[in-house]
Image (tube, helix red, strand yellow):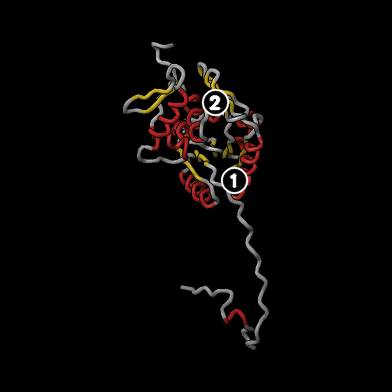
């Protein structure tokens, strides 16, 4: 086995013929790695090698990574966790082929597509919708990271401008403000995120794990979820018919009971 010598070994610091000391060669600094700030990124691809490469590279670059191997799995992951960006393989099993069919799934989530060079025309309509980009395969990690940073910066500058409502409850994302009837709810950031998740998924039962991954980005044991839901319920349902309900053994859901509707 060959032994590798460090640049500062004695043999490397003197002339191999006359043993006269040599001037130290200037060290070229490595380029600084532009790191993420813990943003959650979903990687959805069919090629296991690509998934593993991106997962390791993105984690080393400072991102938190979720993985999916099919379109159905990607939809489930997006529903249970907060992601700032999705990296989607255009050859993902189950991915709708019709124009714009995948848009409702990611809503306004920035998307970076992975595709062979001859498939570019397939996503041109998606690129027109904004906050979408692509890299061609075989992928280069440096290019993926660079395009991700551009998409994330663009998303940060774009106003959310969304308003969600159900019955007499309204959420205004511009001001992070929740109003029920004529009363403004005094919510913590975690309570606001949870209420928004319930509104987007009205009448759908959300498990404790889904809620935990969406609000905090990971699953938390103990009674953290029960305490969070209890605090939100006290503020939300204080003066009106209950909107937040428990499905014992399954989770929680937001909506009006059929007898009240």
Look at the picture and state if 119 lies above or below 171: below
Is 125 situated above or below 55?
above
For the residue carrying disc 2, how many other residues have a C-alpha within 10 Å: few (<14), some (14-19), or many (20+)?
Answer: many
- Quarter placement of the C terminus: top left
In-front residue for pair 191/122: 191
Closer to the camera: disc 1 or disc 2?
2
Residue 110's disc number: none
Q: Give coordinates of residue 13: x percent, y percent.
A: 62, 80
Q: CA distance from mark 1 to mark 2?
A: 37 Å
Q: Nearer the viewer, residue 184 or 3?
A: 184
Closer to the chain start, of discs 1 and 2, is: 1
Q: Is residue 98 above or below residue 43?
A: above
Residue that carries the numbered disc 2 in the rendered image: 178
Question: Is 28 or 219 nearer to us in this picture?
Answer: 219
Residue 88 is left or right of residue 210, and the answer is right
Give the mark count: 2
**Position of residue 223 measured from the top left corner of the image (x, y, whole percent):** 36, 37
Label 2, secondary structure: give it: strand
Residue picked out by circle 1: 144
Q: Is residue 91 left or right of residue 28?
A: left
Q: Quadrant of residue 158?
A: top right
Q: Tell which of 231 and 141 is nearer to you.
A: 231
**Residue 82: x %, y % from top left:** 50, 36
Is 133 placed left or right of 235 in the picture?
Answer: right
The image quarter in which residue 161 lies: top right
Q: Residues within 10 Å of mark 1 (few under 14, many from 20)?
A: many
User: Tag 1, which secondary structure?
Assistant: helix
Q: Residue at x 60, y 26 (%)?
A: 162
Q: Residue at x 54, y 75 (%)?
A: 5
């Amino acid at each position: 086995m060959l032994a590798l010598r460090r640049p500062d070994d004695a043999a490397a610091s003197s002339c191999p013929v006359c043993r006269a000391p040599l001037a130290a060669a200037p060290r070229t600094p490595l380029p600084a790695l532009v790191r993420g700030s813990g943003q959650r990124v979903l990687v959805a691809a069919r090629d296991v090698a690509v998934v593993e490469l991106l997962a390791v590279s993105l984690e080393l670059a400072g991102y938190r990574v979720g993985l999916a191997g099919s379109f159905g799995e990607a939809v489930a992951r997006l529903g249970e966790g907060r992601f700032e960006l999705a990296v989607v393989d255009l050859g993902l099993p189950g991915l709708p082929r019709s124009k714009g069919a995948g848009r409702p799934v990611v809503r306004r989530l920035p998307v970076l597509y992975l595709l062979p060079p001859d498939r570019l025309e397939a996503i041109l309509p998606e690129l027109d919708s904004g906050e979408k980009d692509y890299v061609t395969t075989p992928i280069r990690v440096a290019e993926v990271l660079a395009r991700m940073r551009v998409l994330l910066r663009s998303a940060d500058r774009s106003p959310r401008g969304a308003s969600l409502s159900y019955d007499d409850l309204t959420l205004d994302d511009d001001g992070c403000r929740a109003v029920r009837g004529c009363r403004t709810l005094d919510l913590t950031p975690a309570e606001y995120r949870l209420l928004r998740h319930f509104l987007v998924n009205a009448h759908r039962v959300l498990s404790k794990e889904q809620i935990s991954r969406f609000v905090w980005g990971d699953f938390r044991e103990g009674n953290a979820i029960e305490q969070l839901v209890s605090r939100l319920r006290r503020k939300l349902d204080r003066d009106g018919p209950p909107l937040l309900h428990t499905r014992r053994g399954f989770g929680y859901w937001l909506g009006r009971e059929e007898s009240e509707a």
